[in-house]
Image: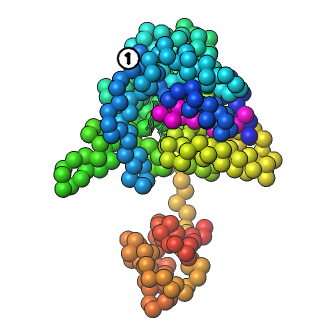
């Protein structure tokens, strides 16, 4: 399924996100060989830092990381880009800095080393907390403008879900001449605390990623798509082709995948690309633009939602499960279970819809 993003023609919309899985030329080749439409380098900075240890934690749902940027100095990236670009494949260089001039310097270097585009990674929730910058539309404007004015390749800016007004920041990127935005970066987090030792899982605040942040990413992408006419790359918690399609239907032209590659290896890229292709073929959809933003028409503002009468129904009154999740979670006390029979009170039911989600057997539905 082809797409056009940042003026680049991608054979598919699946991009490997910035992270240590793309820490050098050799690992970038792995993403390209796996079939990705493009690969983004781990974020490159002027002063590469030593790694703290441990720096990645995972609780079975989401991951926290406190890894800050590439440990290869910018000059070393000439060698890595030669390897990354030795055969076909689009490579986007992720760079970060605190001042416009330093960002422009890094962007010029990476353009010279052969990058096809630049992603400004100015929204990390770690260290000096660039997410503060990512909330400040004026600073993002200045940084983007300085980079755009100094290079010829396209520039996208990676935004933070923590921005107070993500639309304002996306508008600033567009006004500064940026070709697109990506959303979202990891979300500031503490994964947990060991209550026996009083030790937080990792020793400082980190970035949360993986499946739990997908709803935040989807909302950010939809908000930008509804308010700013700018190409968007959706990021956060994509683990399969359906998740990628969710982002696309909410307005993304392409998507990025990070944690899933970290947990499952590059084969997950091949799987998602192939599944997406198959899904498209079955529906004769060859280009992302055919379905881009399709779900936005069904996304209303709260004020637009009509209060319609709903009728709750039980698909099958006999239930032999003993979970009683529906009974426990019905805050209106409308569901009862007598022996193996489910009883639904139409007087008490207000049509909230929760029982439909909690029942493992999908016994409930709402008709209207
Ligand atoms: C271990 C780790 C390191 C990361 N390093 C970077 C980085 O160098 N630059 C960057 O912009 N984002 C970085 N990210 C964020 C990812 O690119 C991505 O925005 C985020 O993880 C959300 O997507 P996901 O849920 O698919 O992982 C990192 C994420 C993880 C888990």
Count how many numbered circles sit on residues in the image. 1
Farthest residue, direction bottom: 339
Q: Between residue 324 and residue 73, name the one nearer to us.
A: 73
Q: Between residue 335 and residue 123, name the one nearer to us.
A: 123
Q: Between residue 323 and residue 330, name the one nearer to us.
A: 323
In this figure, which residue is indicated by the disc labeled 1?
47
Asked whether residue 17 is drawn in magenta, I would say yes
Above or below: residue 142 compared with residue 229:
above
* Residue 148 percent coordinates (x, y): 55, 13
- Determine the secondary structure under disc 1: loop
Instruction: Write the residue at 52% across / 69% down.
Output: 356
Instruction: Write the residue at 45% across / 75% down.
Output: 326
Quadrant of the drawing holding the C terminus: bottom right
* Residue 48 percent coordinates (x, y): 39, 20
Q: Quadrant of residue 308?
A: bottom right
* Residue 155 percent coordinates (x, y): 57, 20
In the rendered structure, which segment of residues is drawn in magenta?
Answer: 11-22
Q: How is the image coloured?
A: rainbow
Above or below: residue 271 compared with residue 98:
below
């Amino acid at each position: 399924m082809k797409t056009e993003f940042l003026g680049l023609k991608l054979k598919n919309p699946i991009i490997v996100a910035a992270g240590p899985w793309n820490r050098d030329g050799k690992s970038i080749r792995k993403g390209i060989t796996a079939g990705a439409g493009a690969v983004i380098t781990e974020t490159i900075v002027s002063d590469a830092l030593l790694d703290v240890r441990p720096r990645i934690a995972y609780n079975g749902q989401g991951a926290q990381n406190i890894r800050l940027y590439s440990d290869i100095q910018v000059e070393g990236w000439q060698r890595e880009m030669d390897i990354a670009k030795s055969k076909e494949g689009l490579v986007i260089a992720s760079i970060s800095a605190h001042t416009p001039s330093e960002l422009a310097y890094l962007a010029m270097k990476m353009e010279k080393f052969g990058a096809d585009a630049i992603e400004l990674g100015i929204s990390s929730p770690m260290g000096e907390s660039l997410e503060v910058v990512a909330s400040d539309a004026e600073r993002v404007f200045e940084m983007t403008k300085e980079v755009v004015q100094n290079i010829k390749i396209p520039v996208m800016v990676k935004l933070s879900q923590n921005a107070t007004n993500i639309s304002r920041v996306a508008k600033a990127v567009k006004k500064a001449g940026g070709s697109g935005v990506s959303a979202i970066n990891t979300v500031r987090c503490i994964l947990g605390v060991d209550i026996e030792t009083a030790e937080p899982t990792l020793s400082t605040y980190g970035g949360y990623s993986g499946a739990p942040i997908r709803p935040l990413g989807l909302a950010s992408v939809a908000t930008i798509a509804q308010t700013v006419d700018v190409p968007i790359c959706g990021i956060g918690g994509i683990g399969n082709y359906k998740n990628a399609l969710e982002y696309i239907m909410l307005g993304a032209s392409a998507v990025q995948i990070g944690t899933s590659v970290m947990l499952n290896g590059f084969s997950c890229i091949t799987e998602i690309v192939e599944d997406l292709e198959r899904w498209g073929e079955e529906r004769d959809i060859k280009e992302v633009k055919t379905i881009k933003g399709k779900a936005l028409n069904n996304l209303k503002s709260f004020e637009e939602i009509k209060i319609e009468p709903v009728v709750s129904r039980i698909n099958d009154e006999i239930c032999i499960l003993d979970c009683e999740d529906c009974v426990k979670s019905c805050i209106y006390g409308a569901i009862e279970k007598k022996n193996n029979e489910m009883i639904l009170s139409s007087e008490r039911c207000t049509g909230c819809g929760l029982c439909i989600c909690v029942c493992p057997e999908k016994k409930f539905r709402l008709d209207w």
